[in-house]
Each structure stands twice: as structure tokens, then as C-alpha cells.
Amino acid sequence: MGFIGAGAVNFGGGEGPWDHASRLERIEGLKVVGVADPDMECARRKLDQRSGHMYEGAEVFSDFRVMLERRKPQAVWIGVPPNAHGSIDPGKDIELHCMKAGVHMFVEKPLSAFRPETVRQVARRLQAGPVVISVGYMFRYAAAINIVRRILEETIGGGKVFMGRYNCAYSEIRKDAWWDIRAGGGPIVEQATHFVDLARYLFGEPELATVRALSIKLHEPAGALRDVPKKDSGALFGEDVPDAFKPPCATAAVWKFQSGALGSLTHGTLLHREKYETEIEVWSDGLRVVLRDPYGQPRLSVRRPGTESAEEIPLTEDDPYLTEDQAFVDAIRSGDGSGIRSTYDDALKTFEFSWAIADAATSR
């Protein structure tokens, strides 16, 4: 296997222990042959921080294409900035190069920072390939989420409603791509897309024509933030980004699902320091389910039909990041991809939905 990208998503970083390398180290029989990143010094440093047989003989490359040609990995984990992949343009066509080389791919979300019409071209070409592709929507593998899904399936009646609330802490987001939607796609496409995907996973497909959204832009008086981090130069992150490309600090969206159910998402970039606050809530006839802190220490509360009090559902500790990586490895080894819960084509639907929300907010 190989890593394309030596950043936080593949090797860990300040936002949390959400990296693939530490999970893959727990799966038997894997061998890293290379790490490709334009910042070769960073890639070497990340490799030096790792130990064990899995990394013996691994090489560092500045160009992923050279790694594919020389080391011929069977599979790669693609964890690069959103504007560095998901295109048919040379240099940003990582997925198409991997498919041509017959290399299986784990692609981190979002599929790209480019528009859906660009990514659709990639998806059409990938359909012709024989390789296994999994996309990193790890919540689909989380035990708590699948309990919520089962409860919804077992609940008879109408009035179904999905609510996602995601407030991230921005004080330590020291990534240029976050503060420029041209590079990162914006907070709905890059971050809240996890909850957009959960809406589909739990409630089915949305009616994109019904999406309505509003946002507070950073350049508006109501969008002034007091704790934006500074660069080494002393300038604030995003300070030099034109207003049209600055991300919103808050977005509120509503829509209808094809089933007739309702959905809403509220995303904020408003909390200080590092800790996020996230939760999802679902309603149905007689039912209210609240899942708090799904990224950290999940807590699940359920008020069932015919009752007036909520019960706390005990949750066993699980690691959806490990589960999604294991499912991808198993699919390659067995030739059976049924354990993969987010294929490229399915992730494209989430990508289109995310952009529909972002576009609706931008148009008002």
C-alpha cells in the first residue's frame, strides 16, 4: 500500500487522532511501500515518527505518479487537500491515474473542492475501472449511528425529521484551505458533509430542488470573529482572501427528502480553542433520538413511542475509522465489496447535496 498525502488525514494532526496510519498499523499483513507528497521533508518526518515492520523499505516521493510506477502499490490512501484531486486536469487527476494503474483507492472526503460537474466526469470514468474504491464517510460504520438507523427502521409512523448541528472551533484552524473556499470548498462541502451524508444514510435521498439556506459571511458585520489564528507573519488567516471566497461563519439549511421527511442542518465556525460541539437529532411519530458528540464520547438518548421519558442507550466503544479501513482491506482481499458503505458513486450524491446547500446559502 501507499499513502498519497503526508498530512493530518493520513498521519495525524492537531485536530484529533483521526488518521489512517495508526488504524492500518492494527491490521495484519499490510506493507507500506511509499508516501507521496510534494513536501518531501514533511513526508520523511512522518515516516521517521513511525516504526514497525509495516514501514520497512518505504520510500518518499514528491510525485504520486512516480510512486505508482516504481513501487506499484496494490492500494493507496488518498488524503490530500480538496483542490488537489477529483478532477480530470493533469496533476489533479489522482483517482484517474490510480485507476489506470489498477490501484485500489481509499479516498478521503470531500471528493474535491471543484464543482459537481467536474467530479461527475471523474465518476463516469471510474465506473469503467475494475478497482475497489471506498470514500471516508466513517460515521456510516459507527455503532451509535447504526443503532439510530435501526430504531428509525423499527418505528412505525410518519412525521420523520432529521436535524444536524455542527459547531466547530476555529481558533486553531491554521490551514489556508479552510479560510479560502477555492481551496477547501467551504465548511459545508469540506466538514459538514459528514452530517449531510448521515442525513442520506438515515433518511434516504433529498429533493435537491427543495433546499433553502442562509449564511453569515465572514466579511459581513455580523460575521466578525474575534479569535482567528495568525500566521507566522502576523497576518490573520484568510485576511488576504477576497470577500467572495471567504467561508461563511454560520449556515442554516432546510430541505425535504424524497420520502416526504424534513431535514435541517446548522453549521457554525464559532467556537474558540479546539473542542467542537456536534449532535444529530431525529424525530418520528412518538420518537425523539439525540446523539451527542459523535466525534468524541458519543451519548445516545431515546424517547420511544408511548413513553414520556428518555432512556440513555449504553454504547460499546468502537472505532469507525478502523472499521472503514478494515472494510476496504477486506474488500480488496476477498473481491467482495459489499462491506463498503460509501462507494464513489454514492459519495458523489453526498457531494452534490453538500454543494446544493452551499450554493443555496451563497445565492441569498
Image: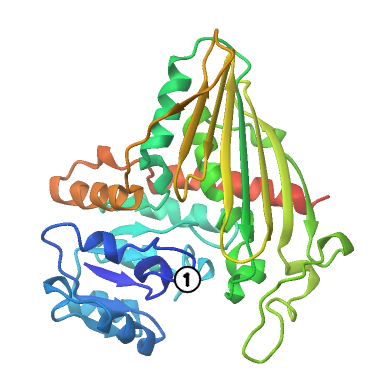
The one nearer the camera, 181 or 317, is 317
Q: Where, by quadrant of the figure, is residue 233 drawn? A: bottom right
Residue sitting farthest toward the right: 221
Q: Residue at x 14, y 50 (%)?
A: 333
Q: On the rendered structure, is 155 left or right of 31?
A: right
Is the residue 72 above or below the residue 148 in the image? below
Q: What percent of the width, then of the height, locates residue 116?
A: 57, 53
Q: Where, by quadrant of the figure, is residue 117 drawn? A: bottom right
Q: Residue at x 71, y 63 (%)?
A: 247
The one nearer the camera, 91 or 297, is 297
Q: Which residue is mark 1?
A: 14
The one nearer the camera, 160 or 70, is 160
The one nearer the camera, 201 or 71, is 201
Q: What percent of the width, then of the height, locates residue 321?
A: 34, 52
Q: On the rendered structure, is 322 left or right of 228?
A: left
Name the amino acid, label 1: Gly
Q: On the rendered structure, is 238 left or right of 83?
A: right
Q: On the rendered structure, is 303 left or right of 323?
A: right
Is the residue 156 above or below the residue 94 in the image? above
Q: Where, by quadrant of the figure, is residue 113 drawn? A: bottom right
Residue sitting farthest toward the top: 306
